[in-house]
Amino acid sequence: MRYFNESWYSRNMQKSNIDGYRTLDGFIRAKLARLEKSEKSFQALYELMFSERENIMFEQSVGYKIVYTTYGECRDSIDKRSKTLSCILSDLPLGSIVGIYMNNSRDWIEMLWAVLRCGYRPLLMNLRLDKITLGEAISTYDVGAIIVDRDVDFAVRTIRCEEITPSNEKTRMQPFGSELLVMSSGTSSHLKICAYTAKEIAAQIVDSCAITRKCPAMKRHYKGQLKQLVFLPFYHIFGLAAVYIWFAFFSRTFVLLNDMTPQTILNTIRRHNVTHIFAVPMLWDKVYESACRTIRDRGEKTWIKFCKGLKLANAVGGIPILRDIVSHLIFKEVRDNLFGPSIRFMISGGSEIRPCVLEFMNGIGYHLANGYGMTEIGITSVELSCNKKLLNSCSVGKPLSSVEYKLGDGGELFVRGKTLAKAVWRGGVKAENDGGWFDTGDIAACKSGRYCILGRRDDLVIAPSGENLNPNIIEQRLYVPGIRGLCLVGIRDGASIQPVVVVSVKAYISSKQLRDIRTQLLQKIHESGLSGLISRAVFVTDALMNPDDIKLNRSKIARRLQNGDMTVANPDLQCDESCAELEEYLRECFAQALDTPLSDITCETDFFADGGGSSLDYFSMISRIQQELGVSLMPESAGQALGTVAQISKYIRETDERG
């Protein structure tokens, strides 16, 4: 690991990165040829992935410096730490399962390969699952040990990552492990363990090569570099396959995040000149909502002008290159305020994405494609067209070279091919992949060979009339500005299932604003012809998704609502309680920004006069409030002081009332 040095970096950049399409294409073809000639084992993949020793593997900001690690340094560390791990696990039979319960980091990558090097099967444990679910999985699948990066209590031997120190001892290493186990993100009753061999991983790599051939945007660089932001967790199939495996095989650079706050993400992208971001719709939604809010705050004329420009940039007719020029010229300021100029290619996956988000990102001059995959099948399609009409249609494209798609009579999507997991365990029962069609459980449509995912079969709600209601389609029709989220669920009422719209609103929402939202929602239900199908709408102040959720879990929301585990907002009573909740939240923000006990902060405590806060601390706090609450605070134009909790609370509520 070295600290960033400008002169060293400049001298070695030609060795560390591929500059130009032609050279990159040649590099890809040459390395793919080596893969095709090699035996399909994890040892062969390991040798190929770490063969470009001088290439930069990781970059991370540490204070005002940038720390980077080469592939050679990472490999040397893996080789040495494997010897220590082999000694620690010497009593564990070869082929045993060793869990990895860690956040994204260089250590995570090193532990993955160290476990394989020692002859074991790494289990990529999902940090988002509760301890009861994980405990059942550990017992059911006879996990022998777990490597962790924190204090955690499991029923089996746990090994702290820092205990696995590099060793120069001469130790005879066993043959590489033969399987990599990926844990699904389902509930305890649906938890699955999917086993991948090097053969399936190699097929995923071949598919990534096909993407670069068919979609030039995928291989575009910035100043001779391709850098992937490590946003998705490596233990998730999207993060494992599309982020790590696709990019590590071709020795590209990963940029690590210090935390997942919006400001850190944006600062990291700009400082490191990130070129590629693969993420779930939740990230793109937040970026979209924040950008639209900022543009609206500049006035109605600015917003109307922006919408006209966006419509022109996404126009179906005309010459594509002219539309691209329009995007890059008129939306330069918007891009500079978001991710900056370095971004070249982005993919959304993991769940459905709203068309308006795609239209925004592609309209302002970025390239955001929709992709599809599952824990059981890997990443199987991405929209590879540069045509904005197709990009904005929510199409996930055509199946990649290693897989096939087909639709059942009811629109069910079936997949088969080389990337599918070798075996899948459900509740301890193993099902081998026999090469047949895998039922994804998703409903899809196909037009001209391109597929759109319409929703999950399990999420369909049957109305009292017997009609199937697709939440994905209905939720897009009913979306109302000013809400945090909305979903359609089925709530059991005696022997029948009642379709219910659950709407998440801000905890501090006023009675007037809540009534306005309800009126707009009921109007949209009527206009969509759903008045006789949807039984009721419920407004809650709970978030529909946790901050670390990958996708919306509608069945979980239905259970929470039925069990009374959600806080219902009443338009006739939503006043005093919401004000109190807002003020309590603001008190916590003050206390954290001032590094002061919460008990010392009252609603009348002045941030500067009483708390001794600096302007930097204040504006950092304001930025946090705007991001977390989705509000706009403009003290300079408010015509009033906003130095106390009471003043900020009043300003937010009055702004909401007017808006």
Image (tube, helix red, strand yellow):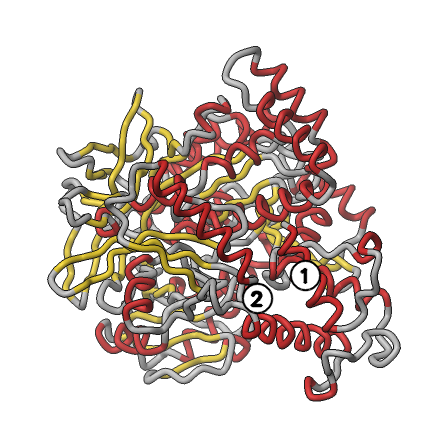
Badge 2: residue crowd in 10 Å (few <14, some 14–19, many ≥20): many
Q: Which residue is mark 1?
A: 652
Q: Is residue 427 rendered to the left or right of residue 538?
A: left
Mark 2 or 1 closer to N-term? Answer: 2
Residue sitting at x 46%, y 35%: 355
Q: Position of residue 657 (x, y in %)?
A: 62, 56
- Say which of 332 and 625 sits in front: 625
Measuring from the top left, give residue 616's x and y in whole percent: 83, 65
- Whole-angstrom CA distance, mark 2 to mark 1, is 9 Å
Q: Quadrant of residue 594?
A: bottom right
Residue type of the residue flagged with mark 1: Ile
Front-lying residue, 617 or 47: 617
Numbered badge on residue 276: none
At horizontal 55% and vertical 56% (from top left) the residue drawn is 513
Q: Up-down: is 167 above or below 596? A: above
Seen at 46% across and 29% down, the residue is: 391
Q: For residue 235, what is the image quadrant?
A: bottom left
Neighbour tally class for label 1: few under 14, some 14-19, many 20 plus, Cα within 10 Å: some
Mark 2 and mark 1 in contact? Answer it, CB < 8 Å.
yes
Q: Quadrant of the N terminus?
A: bottom right
User: As drawn, which residue projects farthest toward the bottom?
Assistant: 599
Residue at disc 1, secondary structure: helix
Asked if residue 176 is positioned above or below residue 239 in the image, the reply reads below
Residue sitting nearer the eye, 97 or 182: 182
Answer with the quarter of the image where residue 435 lies: top left
Q: Is residue 539 visible?
A: yes
Any mark on residue 508, and which? 2
Q: Is residue 60 visible?
A: no
User: Could you tell me residue 507's position as x and y percent?
Assistant: 53, 66
Residue at the (31%, 64%) spot, across then down = 556
